[in-house]
Image (cartoon, helix red, strand yellow):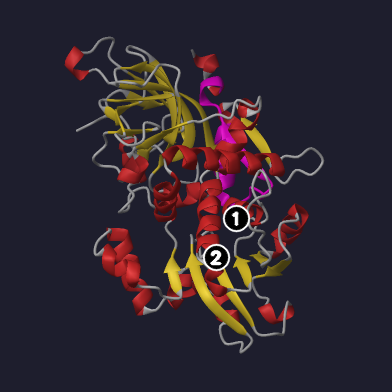
Amino acid sequence: MTTASASADEGAVTYSFVTKTDDRKSIELMKTNLPASKDASEEDKIKFKILKGSLTANNKFYLDFGDKPPFHFFKCYPVDFTQSSLISPPADGTLDDYAHPCVWGIAEVTESKVENVQVGTKFRAMLPIGESVSFRDACLDSEDDSKLTVDRPATNPAYNVFSKLTTLDDGDDEKYEGLSLACFPGIITGFGLNHNLRSNDFYGADAVIVTSASSKVALALALYLKYNGKDDDKPKVAKKIIGYTSESNKEFCRMTGLYDEILGYDEALNTVSTEKTKYTIIDIAGLGKVYSVNMKDPNVEIVKFLTVGASSGAPPSESAFKYFSIYATVKIVLDMMNILQWLASYMNPVQELYLVFKDMADYQAEVGIEQLQATVKEYERLFCRAASTPGKEWITVRNCESEESIQAAFSDIVQGTIPPSETIVLDVVKAVAHRK
């Protein structure tokens, strides 16, 4: 079985952060030693230095499903118990009680025996909060050489893909690298949703509702719905965009200027309009309240209810999935298991789980890989520029370059105390440099 080691240099000491599996509210620094030499047959095929990591609200999901199917995030980078030790040993328990939490990050190739993968190439991938990683085996996608698949049978295949970073060479690639990383994958999901809504003519809706309006997915979608292309050559969207958010985030959402109306989760749509209106709901919060508050209003017709996530952390009794029909639930099973897709394609329930990879695959089939990559990069840059315009910033980056700041940022994310206007970028290499 492939092993992902915690070091890219033989005989080196490398550092990473781990969390206690029965707690997951904090992280502790761990040191890993590798043997001074290896047999050639056991050498890893590709090695990376981790340049940056990021922390977002998504990390709570990765922690929750660390040891649960079908994701098993804790299996991405198993702790090497024989060669590792905590810098501050616990008063009780053993290293067996710890796991590497995963984050999205940028890694640079330091050694490569993979054909057509050069040293110095940067990839975006699911990584540990650490200095480096290496893999026994890896290969480029035969149809898309921007995607490197690492061999980890125990990990969900979707997270075994390292995506090569593309650049625009406009002088701003490095400037926006941290922000785009921290806002990924929200930017990508927003891109997919924008494509979905436009392709389906908004399912006949007069207005679009977005829950968790302060999230990166919602902000990206709202921005892209107002974007008409580099040459202003795309059809303009005249639909009203309504954002649902918590009371504490209302002002932030208004400040972005992306929404026509902002509502709290207890507010009904009849406060916006008393006329008969058709709505498509993009539910990122996963909170059934938005659906239940409005579904019985005779002037509200919900033509589509796409559930994207569950950022609210609502219990099952309050979840959006509570309102899914049996028909919608069957479609979820078919889509998630990727079976009987001919049948799933005919099913069109009002309530539906949104899967961005399907839209991305459709878009790729339509325009080709190169055009897809270029367009995604264009939209990524659009988001970063809009979000960080001097004097009008929606989002700032908190750079964590010390052990203490990285640990504090992790705790802030878990506790939900990070405001939507702040993103977190981690530099473990710099943080542990004093230990070398």
Mark 2 or mark 1: whose residue is earlier in sequence: 1
Q: Quadrant of residue 170?
A: top right
Query: Which of the numbered marks, if any, corresponds to residue 67?
Result: none
Residue situated in front as seen by the camera: 378 or 69: 378
- The quarter in which the N terminus is drawn is top left
- Residue 69 falls within the magenta-colored stretch: no
**Residue drawn at 61 percent across, 87 percent down:** 297
Q: Secondary structure at mark 1?
A: helix
**Residue drawn at 64 percent across, 47 percent down:** 229
* Residue 372, image x, y percentages: 48, 42
- Residue 411 falls within the magenta-colored stretch: yes
Residue situated in front as seen by the camera: 435 or 282: 282
- Which residue type carries mark 1? Leu
**Residue drawn at 54 percent across, 49 percent down:** 186
Measured Cα–Cα span from mark 2 to mark 1: 10 Å
The magenta-colored residue range is 405-430
* Residue 237, image x, y percentages: 66, 62
- For mark 2, what is the residue? 282
**Residue drawn at 25 percent across, 25 percent down:** 136
